[in-house]
C-alpha cells in the first residue's frame, strides 16, 4: 500500500518526465533519498530488470565464485560446470552469510561457516550434520534460492524477480552495436571497487552526460573529448548512446593517440571516421560501458543503501595484448587515465549528493538539462515509466 506522499511524488516524477526534451529538467530530489520510494524502486526497477554483475572471464573455472550485494540482499555467482549460476548467499538453516569475504576459486561446494551445512554448486543441500535427528527434514527443500542469469556478449546479467524479458530481445539493437568489439572474447584485466557516497542514480547520470567534461574533467578529458562536440547519436527504449569525437585542437596537436588508447586496436571496428573514437552507453537501468578502439571500459554500480553505492571500474581487452613486452606499461597508462577521471567523478558525485536534502541552500527547483546532458532525461523517462506501472 503506497502512502499519499509516495503517490504524489510518483505523479510529480511522471509529470516532469513527460515534458518535451527541450524543456527537460531534473526529477524531484526526493527520489534520491526517500526510503519508501527506494523500496518501490528496488521492486519495480532493479529486481525487475537485468543487472550486469560480472564478465565471464572473472569466473573462468568450475567452482569459481563471486559474491555481490544489492542493498542488504546477498548473492553469489558460481561457475557450475561452465554455467554461471546466481544463488542466494544466505544459508537456509539460520541465515549465516555463506561467503562474506572475497571471491573464491575452484571450489567443489559451499560450506556454511556457522554449522557446516554443505551446498553443491547449483545450490542443492548436500549434507547437514546430525540431520538424522530431525523428523521429516528434507534436503531438497533446503537448497539455496536460484536467480535467473543470462550471458550477453560475455557479460553475466542477473534478473532477481525472474520476470524480465530475455536480454536477447531487451538489448537486441545494443547487441548489434557492441558485437564488433567481441566482448565475449575479452578479458577483465583491471577491476577496482570504490565506495560511492551517493545514490546509485547519481553515478548513472554522471556516466551518461558529457556536459561536465567542461568543468569536472577540464584537466583530463575535456581537451581530447570536448563536451560541446558530443551528441546523443542513438537512443531507444532500452539504451542511449553518446558519440564523443576528438577535439579539433587535440587532433591537430597530437599525432600519437596512444596515451589515451594504449592497447592494440581491435580489428574491423565500424568507426565512422578517424575522428570518432569513443561511444558511451547507458543501457537501462544500470549497464554503463564505453567502447574504444582498443578496449571496453565498464562501470558496475550496485546500491548499498539509499545514500551509498558500490562502484567498480573495470577494463576489458583482448588477451593477445598480454603478449606485448610493454604490456604492463600500457595497462598502467590505461588505469591511470581511468582512475584520474573517475576520481574526479566520484568527488563531484559526492558533492552533488551531499546537498540533495538541503532545504535552504539548494539547486534550482527546476534544474534544467542542457543539450549535452539530456541522456539524463532519457534515463529518467525509463525509470519513471517503470515506477508508474
Ligand atoms: S546457519 Fe548455516 S549451517 Fe547454520
Ligand atoms: Fe565524468
Image: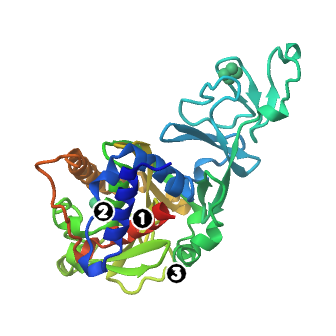
* Residue situated furthest left in the rendering: 361
Q: Residues within 10 Å of mark 1 (few under 14, many from 20)?
A: many
Name the spot of residue 42 as percent of width and height, x first.
Answer: 49, 50
What is the number of the mark on residue 384? 1
Q: Is ligand 2 closer than 8 angstroms to the Cβ of mark 3?
A: no
Q: How far apart in space, not on screen, are marks 2 and 1 (Cα)?
A: 9 Å
Q: For numbered disc 1, what is the local secondary structure?
A: helix
Tell which of 111 and 332 is nearer to you.
111
Using a 10 Å C-alpha cutoff, classify the residue at mark 3 as few (fewer than 14 neighbours), some (14 to 19) or many (20 or more).
Answer: few
Q: Earlier in the sequence, mark 3 or mark 1?
A: 3
- Outermost residue on the bottom side: it is 273
The reply, left or right, for residue 108 in relation to residue 133 is left
Task: Tell me what residue is drawn at x 48 percent, y 83 percent.
Answer: 270
Q: Are marks 2 and 1 in contact (CB under 8 Å)?
A: yes
Measure the C-alpha gap from mark 3 to mark 1: 38 Å
Residue 262, horizontal then vertical, whole percent = 37, 64
Ligand 2 is located in which of the four quadrants? bottom left
Q: Which residue is mark 3?
A: 268
Q: Is residue 176 above or below residue 62?
A: below
Q: Quadrant of residue 129?
A: top right
Amino acid at each position: 500500500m503506497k502512502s499519499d506522499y509516495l503517490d504524489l511524488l510518483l505523479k510529480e516524477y511522471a509529470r516532469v518526465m513527460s515534458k518535451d526534451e527541450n524543456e527537460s529538467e531534473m526529477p524531484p530530489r526526493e527520489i534520491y533519498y526517500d526510503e519508501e520510494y527506494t523500496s518501490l524502486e528496488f521492486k519495480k526497477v532493479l529486481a525487475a530488470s537485468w543487472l550486469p554483475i560480472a564478465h565471464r572471464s572473472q569466473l573462468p573455472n568450475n567452482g569459481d565464485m563471486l559474491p555481490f550485494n544489492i542493498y542488504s540482499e546477498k548473492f553469489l555467482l558460481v561457475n557450475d560446470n561452465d554455467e554461471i549460476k546466481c544463488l542466494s548467499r544466505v544459508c537456509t538453516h539460520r541465515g549465516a552469510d555463506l561467503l562474506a569475504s572475497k571471491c573464491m576459486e575452484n571450489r567443489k561446494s559451499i560450506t556454511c561457516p556457522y554449522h557446516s551445512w554443505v551446498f553443491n554448486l547449483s545450490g542443492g543441500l548436500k549434507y547437514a550434520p546430525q540431520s538424522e535427528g530431525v523428523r521429516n527434514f528434507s534436503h531438497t527443500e533446503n537448497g539455496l534460492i536460484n536467480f535467473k542469469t543470462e550471458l550477453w556478449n560475455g557479460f553475466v546479467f542477473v534478473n532477481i524477480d525472474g520476470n524480465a524479458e530475455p536480454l536477447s530481445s531487451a538489448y537486441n539493437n545494443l547487441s548489434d552495436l557492441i558485437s564488433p568489439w567481441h566482448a565475449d572474447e575479452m578479458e577483465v584485466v583491471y577491476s577496482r571497487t570504490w565506495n560511492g557516497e551517493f545514490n546509485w542514480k547519481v553515478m548513472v547520470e554522471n556516466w551518461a552526460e558529457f556536459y561536465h567534461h567542461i568543468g569536472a574533467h577540464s584537466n583530463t578529458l575535456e581537451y581530447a573529448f570536448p563536451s560541446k562536440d558530443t551528441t546523443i547519436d542513438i537512443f531507444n527504449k532500452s539504451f542511449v548512446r553518446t558519440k564523443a569525437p576528438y577535439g579539433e585542437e587535440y587532433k591537430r596537436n597530437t599525432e600519437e593517440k596512444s596515451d589515451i588508447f594504449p592497447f592494440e586496436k581491435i580489428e574491423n571496428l565500424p568507426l565512422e571516421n578517424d575522428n570518432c573514437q569513443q561511444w558511451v552507453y547507458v543501457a537501462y537501468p544500470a549497464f554503463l560501458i564505453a567502447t574504444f578502439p582498443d578496449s571496453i571500459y565498464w562501470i558496475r554500480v550496485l546500491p548499498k543503501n539509499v545514500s551509498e553505492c558500490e562502484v567498480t571500474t573495470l577494463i576489458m581487452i583482448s588477451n593477445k595484448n598480454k603478449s606485448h613486452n610493454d604490456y604492463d606499461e600500457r595497462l598502467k597508462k590505461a588505469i591511470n587515465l581511468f582512475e584520474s577521471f573517475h576520481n574526479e567523478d566520484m568527488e563531484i558525485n559526492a558533492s552533488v549528493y551531499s546537498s540533495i536534502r538541503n532545504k535552504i541552500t539548494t539547486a534550482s527547483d527546476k534544474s534544467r538539462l542542457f543539450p549535452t546532458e539530456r541522456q539524463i532525461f532519457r534515463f529518467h523517462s525509463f525509470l519513471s515509466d517503470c515506477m508508474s506501472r
